Image (spheres, rainbow, N blue to C red):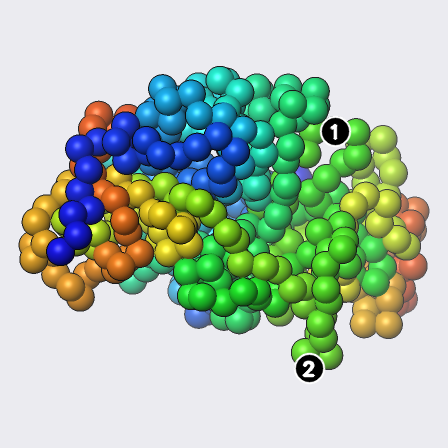
Amino acid sequence: MINKVVAGADEAIKDICDGQTLMLGGFGLCGIPENCIAALVKSGVKNLTCIANNAGVDDFGIGLLLQTRQVKKMISSYVGENVEFERQLLSGELDVELIPQGTLATRCLAAGYGMPAIFTPAGVGTEVAEGKEVRSFKGKDYLMEYAFEADFAVVKAWKGDTAGNLIFRSTSRNFNPVMAMAGKTTIAEVEELVEAGQLDPDQIHTPGVYVHRIFQGRNYEKRIEQRTVRKKVND
Amino acid sequence: MLDKDGIAKRIAKEIKDGYYVNLGIGIPTLVANYIPSEINVVLQSENGLLGMGPFPFEGEEDPDLINAGKQTITTLPGSSIFDSAMSFGMIRAQKIDLTILGAMEVSENGDIANWKIPGKMVKGMGGAMDLVASAKNIIVAMQHVNKAGESKLLPNCTLPLTGIKCIKKIVTELAVLDVLPEGGFKLLERAPGVSVDFIRNATLGKLYADDNVPEMVIE
């Protein structure tokens, strides 16, 4: 079997080049590939196009790659919580393409399923539709949206095995499985890496065929963006 | 006139037993607090969860378990978790019975604008365009007028659109209204103490009102 296991993030991302397109998994700061983002910052690779639902916060997630001006373009659905992002956008240093969240997810899915395009009603009659082909099915209009093409998909899973199979945990799954399917080369960092055979095949979310490199990450911070709690009532 | 919780309480009365419901950010989130305990409702969070539970107890927050507003939450018995593509797949396939979201403007033909103000920092549409384009049943929770006192129920939206011809029901601090298929707002209920004339003055789009428009009943 081909060895997919690499020592760590630095080795996993070492051939990501200036100007390439990356998919980065996660929703907000939940389920982001923390180790690979740190390694990308260290590598200094630049002019990246990043496809990711969000752009992180100022000092964490993709925000770290924005601080170091390594991102040329973001393709996202929501880029709220990031002051440096806003500055670069308004000054014209950063190009941003905002697309509906379901369109973002489904363009990943299409790539992973070998389909060149999808039809979605999201954005019909809005500025998102500008320049796009509209097709009518049973009296309803749909936009044709192309499958993404990404040089690399960088995802985070909970558990993985040496065959590249992945299992995600809770809502940190989000965009990770669909992006894992969509990269020309897919890099997965996992909290726990086990030998092939130790994960139940019935429980696998992403089959190893989609994963080219895998490693066990370290020191996960798992920062919480909005810590909301309720008080315990003593009775 | 209703406060935000009043709007949420009135909308909660539209939720039926067995509904799968997606709640947007803001007033829609408050609706969860007023769903009658005798009915069984499953809340969807579009980052990939059906069966959203309340906030966790202090010290039990799980960074891997958040809602679409990035808040820490919990699951419930019967919850399920899935990826983002499936989440919007079930929205597109109209498996979700009711979507409740906020709006900056709604037009008399059911167009909605809620994601972008020209000249201001644009944060993005998130899942709003997918939701309004696909949902079979959308209730908009919004203020009838803006801070300057100008109507937000208009003949045509002035802000960039989120979706077209998709809104059928609106609940504001003043009224419950339907958007008629042929165009125009139909006044269904008045907020306690609010007159039809007051609502008419606050509505720039075409407003249709019968002689006796009932007052809302909110417990």
Residue lying at 74% horizontally and 29% vertically, measured from the top left = B120
Residue A37 shows in this picture: yes
Residue lying at 19% horizontally and 61% vertically, measured from the top left = A203
Residue lying at 38% horizontally and 27% vertically, measured from the top left = A40
Residue A86 shows in this picture: no
Q: Is residue B201 above or below residue B134?
A: above
Residue B92, percent across and down? 55, 66
Quadrant location of the N terminus of chain B in the rendered image: top right
The dot on residue A71 is none
* Alpha carbons under labels 2 and 1: distance apart: 38 Å
Secondary structure category for the residue under label 1: loop
Place residue A208 in its image quadrant: bottom left
Residue lying at 42% horizontally and 54% vertically, measured from the top left = A182
The dot on residue A138 is 2
Residue A16, percent across and down? 39, 34
Dot 1 corresponds to which residue?
B120
Query: Which amino acid type is marked by label 1?
Result: Lys
- In the rendered structure, the answer to whether residue B123 lies left or right of residue A109 reads right
Q: Is residue A162 above or below residue A146?
A: above
Secondary structure category for the residue under label 2: loop
The chain that hosts pointer 2 is: A
Residue A38, percent across and down? 34, 24
Q: Residue furthest bottom?
A: A138
How dense is the environment of label 2, judged by Cα within 10 Å: few (below 14), some, or many (20 and up)? few
